[in-house]
Image (cartoon, rainbow, N blue to C red):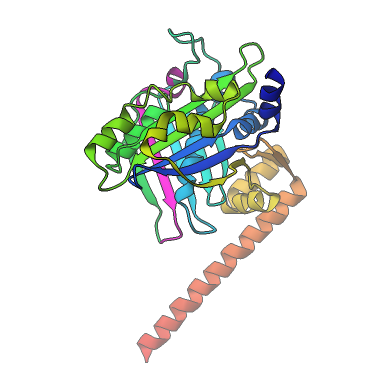
Amino acid sequence: MKKDVLRYKTERKDRLIQCMAADGMVRIAFVDGTNLVREAKRLLKLSRVATAALGRQLMMTAIMSLDLKGERDLVSTILKGDGPAGSMICTGNSRLEVKGSVTNPDIELPLNELGKLDVGGFVGRSGKLSVVSDLGLKEPYVGLSNLVSGEVAIDFANYYAASLQRPALVYLGVRLQSGTGEVRAAAGVFAEPLPGCPEDVIDRIQAKSEQIARFSERLDAGETAEELLERVFGELGLVYVGEREPLYRCDCSRARIERALLSIGVEELGKMIDEDRGAEVTCRFCDKIYTFTEEQLRSLQNETAAQRSSAMNKRDDAKAYEQNNEDK
């Protein structure tokens, strides 16, 4: 039996399973995000408490990405509490590719009074949760809610209730090896009653919070996602809709970094050239370092100056055209 469990744990891919229940009145998503949390920990060199906190946020961002339809649609979740974590930012796209960052990834805290990782203390129990949905419209949609615990799952549940007026059951858990700090399992559940859902069904959904509270532990023990879902939601007539694989993937590139450097302007590039004789830019989502020599920065500076000159010439031409029309 142990061999079977070990084989399952080493071979399984991350899964994001979508279900419906209660005759289509409740939508449910289950995510096994073990590998994406491991990848975030590896790339960003996260402490144990940072792994648990950012891992929870990454899984929730993946779940929220299910609502994206367009190729370039994005959703970003931003947790900014009064804890030592600083800002925590995660972004997901319609392909379920997610990435994340935390201002202070290496900070470690003592265990809380329950003997568990102090995620609430790390994030902070006061602050804001922002959700930015960029759907290709003129302006992105921004939703805001207050942090209520810093434990991430409760804060997202509060966001759905307070900002969207949509009550939802949210569980997010990351299980780490006590000795090494390696990620053993990471799981998340999102259950949302849809408009028209009977009150008694909503009450039954909310009453299941204790049943899902150990999903990451059970996943680590070898239970499958199907077994966990059936155990908790089977009585509601669970119907499987689809399954996809969420991935941790950073889309940074040298070209993007160059565009960012171009945007800071001629003067700032000049300071980098004069004071530092070059630049190193680190991607906050994957920790990759991009190095620019003095000559490369000077080339970017010249390009920026040329763009500024071109823009000024166009503006002057437009003013001259308007003036000519007025004179006529």
**Count of numbered tags:** 0
In this rendering, does residue 50 appear at all? Answer: no
Is residue 123 shown above or below 269?
above
Q: Nearer the viewer, residue 72 or 184?
A: 184
Coordinates of residue 222 in the picture (x, y in percent)? 60, 24
> In the picture, which quadrant includes the C terminus?
bottom left
In this rendering, does residue 184 appear at all? Answer: yes
> In the picture, which quadrant includes the N terminus?
top right
Q: Nearer the viewer, residue 118 or 101?
A: 118
Q: Nearer the viewer, residue 148 or 193?
A: 193
**Which residue is painted at 52% across and 73% down in the image?**
314
Residue 126 within the segment the image draws in magenta: yes
* Residue situated furthest bottom in the rendering: 328
Q: What is the magenta range?
A: 120-137
* Residue situated furthest left in the rendering: 199
**Which residue is painted at 66% across and 52% down in the image?**
258
Residue 249 within the segment the image draws in magenta: no
**Which residue is painted at 68% across and 38% down in the image?**
275
Coordinates of residue 111 in the picture (x, y in percent)? 50, 10
Coordinates of residue 280 in the picture (x, y in percent)? 69, 39
